[in-house]
């Protein structure tokens, strides 16, 4: 056990399993039972996550971790998902005990080996989502964390792959992966789901509640490095109000009041403009029931400055 071939087979079987699971769900949400159902390779049965609920899952049969688990829920006892993004990479904290504990060494070792693994996020009780293959692309033993790239934009072959054997395996693996359906970036998927839940699936400006037409907007845009995929940086908006917000035709001040750009207010046009945009001026946003889900006034403040700047003088 623990041979490169066997390890790689386990990983590929696990990725195949996830692909099947993903194809069978409409929203990419997996159950704990889905993740605990073992893949079978050479008579060994290996689940995709730790049966004990631990964050770093290294089955005894293979040499390196197969998956890591984060949670959107801070009380889950595994690293928190979403609020720690460094240069577009997910920060994943070591388990307690210091860099010399075997599980932390196993995690850090992934930064050197470049081995692909699965990144699982617990969304809420019994609901999970996953991205694969992801890679550990950085390690900070002093800070006690690694950085995980879940963008899928990096190929499996990379200069960090140490030996020729590894290179060959990696290029074979690349061929396998390209047949996989392109996964939605994990954090975007989790973000969308959480924001729509917080707003009860309806537009915060007009209350439209057609799932096909309601989206999760970022208050601090995703491209901005201060942006976080957390509910307090999100707004559920219908496609029209999302587009209007992104283009700074409407703005929201830190007291949740909607503002409409002056030149838009002065325009004369049909009912869509009148009801859809001009009518919003001075209205208060429809907020999530849960106080902790409401937009962070600091995020709104930063974004509102941009809206003000966009207004014609
Ligand atoms: Zn709307």
Image (cartoon, rainbow, N blue to C red):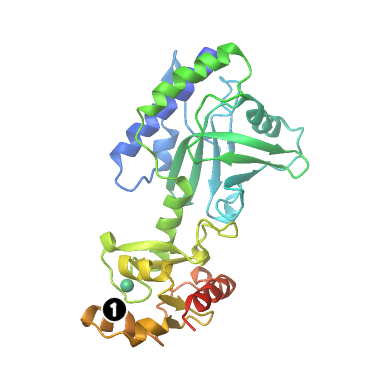
Say which residue label 1 marks.
Answer: 276
Q: Where in the figure is residue 50, as x and y percent of width and height?
A: 54, 35
Secondary structure found at label 1: helix
In screen coordinates, is 238 left or right of 254? left
The single residue placed furthest to the front in the displayed view is 313
Is residue 284 visible in the rendered image? The answer is no
Q: Residue 70 location in percent, x, y?
A: 55, 46
**Residue at the farthest left position:** 270
Determine which quarter of the picture holds residue 265: bottom left
Q: Mark 1: few, some, or many residues within 10 Å (few <14, many ≥20)?
A: some
Q: Is residue 165 visible?
A: yes
Determine whether the beta carbon of the residue marked 1 sits less than 8 angstroms from the nearest atom of ligand 1: yes
Residue 195 in the image: state x and y as whole percent.
43, 62
Q: Image point 45% across, 77% down: which residue?
A: 251
Residue, x 27% and y 84% (percent of image)? Answer: 274
The quadrant in which the N terminus is found is top right
Q: Nearer the viewer, residue 75 or 9?
A: 9
User: In the shown orientation, is residue 80 left or right of residue 260?
Assistant: right
- Say above or below: 253 vs 213: below
Q: How many marks?
A: 1
Quarter location, residue 175: top left
Q: Position of residue 181 (x, y in %)?
A: 34, 35
- 100 is higher (above) or lower (below) than 126: above
Q: Write down which quadrant ligand 1 falls in.
A: bottom left
């Amino acid at each position: 056990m623990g041979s490169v071939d066997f390890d790689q087979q386990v990983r590929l079987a696990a990725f195949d399993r996830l692909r099947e699971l993903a194809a069978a769900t409409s929203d990419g949400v997996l159950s704990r039972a889905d993740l605990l159902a073992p893949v079978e390779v050479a008579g060994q049965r290996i689940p995709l996550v730790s049966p004990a609920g631990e964050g770093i899952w290294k089955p005894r049969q293979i040499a390196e971790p197969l998956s890591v688990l984060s949670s959107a829920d801070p009380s889950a006892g595994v690293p928190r998902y979403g609020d720690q993004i460094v240069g577009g990479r997910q920060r994943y904290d070591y388990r307690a005990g210091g860099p010399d504990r075997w599980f932390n060494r196993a995690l850090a070792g992934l930064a050197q080996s470049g081995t692909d693994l699965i990144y699982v996020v617990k969304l809420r009780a019994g609901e999970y989502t996953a991205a694969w293959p992801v890679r550990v692309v950085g390690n900070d033993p002093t800070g006690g964390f690694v950085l995980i790239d879940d963008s899928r934009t990096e190929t499996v072959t990379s200069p960090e792959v140490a030996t020729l054997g590894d290179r060959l395996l990696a290029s074979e693996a690349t061929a396998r992966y390209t047949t996989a359906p392109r996964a939605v970036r994990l954090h975007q998927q989790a973000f969308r789901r959480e924001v729509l839940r917080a707003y009860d699936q309806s537009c915060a400006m007009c209350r439209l509640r057609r799932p096909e037409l309601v989206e999760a907007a970022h208050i601090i845009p995703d491209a901005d490095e201060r942006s976080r995929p957390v509910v307090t940086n999100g707004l559920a908006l219908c496609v029209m109000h999302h587009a209007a917000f992104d283009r700074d035709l409407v703005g929201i001040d830190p007291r949740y009041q909607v503002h409409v750009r002056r030149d838009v207010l002065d325009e004369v046009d049909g009912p869509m403009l009148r009801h859809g945009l001009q009518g919003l001026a001075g209205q208060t946003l429809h907020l999530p029931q849960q106080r902790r889900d409401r937009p962070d006034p600091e995020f709104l403040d930063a974004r509102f400055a941009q809206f003000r700047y966009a207004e014609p003088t």
